[in-house]
Image: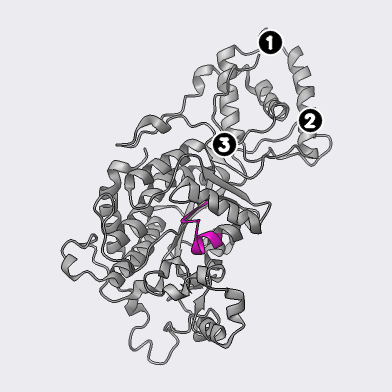
Amino acid sequence: RRPSRPLVQRAVRPSSPLRRGLLDPFVVMFAASVPSSSVAPARARSPVGISDRRARMDNVISRTARPTPTRASRRVARISARHRAEASRLDVDGVSAAPEPARRAILGGVAATVGAWSLPAIAEEAGVDAPAAPAVPAKGAILVTGANSGVGLSAAKQLAARGETVVLACRTEAKGEDARAAILEKVPDASLLVLKGAGLEMTDLRQVSDYCKAFLDSGIPLDTLILNAGIMAVPLGRTAQGHEMHFGVNHLAHFLVQDSLRGAMRDRAAARGVPGRVVACSSIANMLPGALDVDDLDWRARESRYEKWSAYAASKAENVLLTDEIARRENSQTLVANSFHPGIVTTNLVRYILPELTAEKRDPEAERATPQGRAMSKMGIRDADEGAKTHVWLATAADAGRVSGRFFVDPGLEYPGGATREQLVRAQDWFLVSPTDPLARQLHLPDKFFEWRTAENARKLWTRSAEMTDAFKVA
């Protein structure tokens, strides 16, 4: 007999015949040996201060298309039909079938293992009777915060064009749907997910926590987390919890996101044998001397002397310290974390300082053909598509999955590291100091610009961030 209702809420379901074909071989194998008590129910997550209105979510996500049965999947169904026929004749120690509770537990465990993301691996040998089931779905999703505009939108589009499944984490569900529609115009077969009824509002830790809980409840397997959302050089303001706006949005909200999701990423990575990735979008503005003060993260002591560029630069330094500390805490075989500078990108981020250069008011292709456009390119000013290339490299490149605790200014180009003058010019970062420049070694450059990048500052920032977000962390 079949269970009367599914025991595992999943984001996407295969068709019923196919689902039965996939699960029945496992029931035959384990029905007589696994007691119902061996599969424990999932423990409900209950972050402090969050209501139970999201405890059970129906239709958690939107996605572009449901998987259609392939030739291989139809073969699985035929194979499974043979197993069902054999199962009807099977008698193990006089027991022809497991009790109903045991079958429910088995089906629940198998469903959680198989998931809705990938079909089991199909045996290549024609004589094999049953497909082998992977321990976990082979490929998960990439979550991008701030995916509705600027380099976040461009990164999501480029990742989707490469065949990646991308979760669009935006301030509201409506913004996520708008971003999805915009990407589908360029990439019609894109696999894009938007959480139903959940928005990642970075100015309110309670809503950030709510989003993280909704994501974990959705069951979406997460391979890569791109911490991209941010603000730049805005006037003094405070978040819902009273934190300085740059610190609260650019760092603290992202700290809560990764702190809530990192455990699930770690478990998944350990099971599949491929490290998960945390990628943080920083900026070379982090080199601004004296910007970071880990003893006054919220600018309370310095409020009368508030300077928006220093506040922005400090938050970008915090992005680097965050990934440095994750790299120190995590085994690189299960999780790697790196940060990067996307370039000087003309997007909505600069609307407070260079409104005439926002991407919405520019035609990048036409602009690059003009003398002024060529000059801007040589100056290192990039459009959103150019700015997203390091996002994509860190999220997908094999080489990027082998390093942790690094800061990059271009795909594969670590900084300071040993970046040469030629490499920096080629990356449009000619204005940066190379360790090979004349007098650089004598003046301790560019290392002197990164004096704030210490293990002590990283640990102190982590400890204080954890204290500030503890009430909102998803258990």
* Mark linked to residue 213: none
Q: Residues within 10 Å of mark 3 (few under 14, many from 20)?
A: many
Residue 228: percent from the left, percent from the top?
Answer: 45, 59
* Viewer-proximal residue among 283 and 103: 283
As measured in the structure, the alpha-carbon distance from the residue carrying label 3 to the one carrying label 2 is 29 Å
Q: Secondary structure at mark 1?
A: loop
Rendered position, 208 above or below 338: above
Extreme residue in the bottom direction: 438
Mark 3 vs mark 1, CA separation in Å: 33 Å
Q: Quadrant of the C terminus?
A: top left
Residue shown at the point (38%, 87%) measured from the top left: 440
Q: Earlier in the sequence, mark 3 or mark 1?
A: 3
Q: Amino acid at mark 1?
A: Ser
Q: Which residue is mark 2?
A: 129
Q: Where is 217 relative to 415, above or below?
A: above
- Residue span colored magenta: 142-155
Q: Which residue is mark 3?
A: 11
Q: What's the residue type where badge 2 is placed?
A: Asp
Position of residue 435 measured from the top left corner of the image (x, y, whole percent): 42, 83
Label 3 vs label 1, nearer the camera: 3
- Distance from the alpha carbon under mark 1 to that under mark 2: 21 Å
Which scheme is used to colour this image of the protein? one colour
Secondary structure, mark 2, is loop
Q: Position of residue 217 (x, y in %)?
A: 47, 36
Amino acid tagged 3: Ala
Q: Quadrant of the N terminus?
A: top right
